[in-house]
Amino acid sequence: MTGDDAIEPAAAEAPWRLQLRAALGDLPAVRRRSLRSLAPAAGAGAGLQPAPPEGAADHRTGEPGPPPPFPLLDLASNDYLGLSRDPAVLAAAAAELAVSGLGAGASRLVSGTRPVHLELEQALATWLGRERVLLFPSGFQANLAAVCALADRHSLVLADRLIHHSLLAGVRASGARLKRFAHNDPADLERLLLSERRARPEGRLLVLCESLYSMEGSTPPLAALAALCGRQRVPLLVDEAHALGVLGPGGRGLAHGLAEVAIVSGTLGKAFGSGGAFLAGDGLVGDWLLQSSGAFRYTTALAPPLAAGALASLERIQADPGAAAALLKRSDRWRDALAAAGWPRPPGEGPILSVRLGDDATALAAQDRLEAAGLLALAIRPPTVPEGTSRLRLVLRAGLPSGTLEKLLEALGPGPRLSRPLAEPGL
Ligand SMILES: Cc1ncc(COP(=O)(O)O)c(C=O)c1O
């Protein structure tokens, strides 16, 4: 046998791998995502030090891009009240870590329930005025559980057109049919509800919406949606992931006091500065979730230190309602200032400011301009948002240094309303 005979021909790549490679190859450069490491910058408060992983591609050229040399001020994360670094919250998490260890080691119904889980569930239920709260390891999972609890393959789910991906995943997992109503439009929901009632008087229905849309910054007329669902005797599930801690009385969200809302979904990973999530409802719905939900039952319980941190955050939110009020006031000032500078006024009233720019390249260019000025705010592109609506998502937080707005306006420059010629020829 010669040396040449020993060389095996290279094994052909398996067809499933070729399919993945082809699908990845079809992604245009402006649609490719890459992970980016952002280390907290020492002594810089809200600063994040970017360090792209080796081989990370620049979204414009596909070539590796150098990191900016300075820390970036964070206008991208959802830690709205800055509680992820609050000393009392960190101390509570550390104390629980010492007592319970890091992980619960089992699911809630096996041996994973710690006193802090029950304490947090009770405290959230009292705060929100709901009979029962159940914790989940993430909001994504909680939404999956909530939809599957209230819908099955015989159901029709009516969802706001801009609903979060986790709720859509829940609809798919439930096997229900899906129809969308126009964003924040009770009249369109009513039209769909009435036509479905006429077609299938006994059909099972479920309505889904959010109280603060994370990519729009907008809020629905929730009382009108709830009243409509109440009249039609249809359950309404409201995802309050971005509103809790910030909107509604004392940060209790916009569903607070609306008895027609069957389930409130909340995450502890945003304004609470921790991780995990919960569903809140009445005793019947809570018991149904406990008895039937696979997403609750077959998963390791929320890490006890995260539950303890969230409990301490809840105490901070209750003790200082002024923090959310100040944040909303500041958000409004930013909206006015952006509009005055010629940018489309971001909709809504919360701390998420969505500046519509249109195409991907314009949104990425705005992100780059901000980054060069030391500000981290993300260009949000399809498929996260509908085609042609790429935007810059600015997130305000308590504790942003003064002068941040001025820095932002300078980096953005004048908006299209001011930079377009005032009198175009022929008009
Ligand atoms: C509206 C909405 N619902 C649910 C979630 C999921 O929450 P979590 O991050 O706790 O999984 C998110 C987070 O991105 C969200 O924006």
Image (cartoon, grey):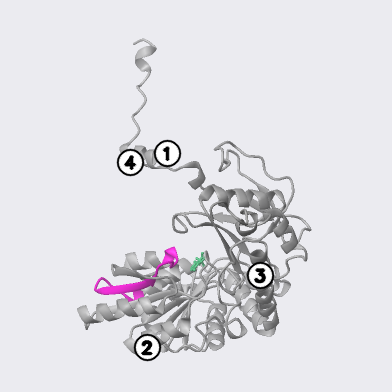
Amino acid bearing label 4: Trp
Q: Which residue is mark 4?
A: 16
Q: How many marks?
A: 4
- In the rendered view of the protein, which quadrant contains the N terminus? top left
Magenta region, residue range? 148-166
Amino acid bearing label 3: Asp
- CB atoms of marks 2 and 3 within 8 Å: no
Q: Position of residue 165 (x, y in %)?
A: 43, 63
Q: Which mark is residue 232?
A: none
Q: Mark 4: which secondary structure?
A: helix
Using residue 420 as the reference point, say whether residue 26 is left or right of it: left
Up-down relation of residue 421 to residue 178 (above or below): above
- In the rendered view of the protein, which quadrant contains the C terminus? bottom right
- The part of the image, by quadrant, that contains residue 114 is bottom right
Q: Cα distance, mark 2 to mark 3?
A: 36 Å
Residue at image position (67%, 65%) is: 340
Q: Cα distance, mark 1 to mark 2?
A: 49 Å
Between 315 and 200, the one nearer to me in the picture:
200
- CB atoms of marks 4 and 1 within 8 Å: no
Amino acid bearing label 2: Gly
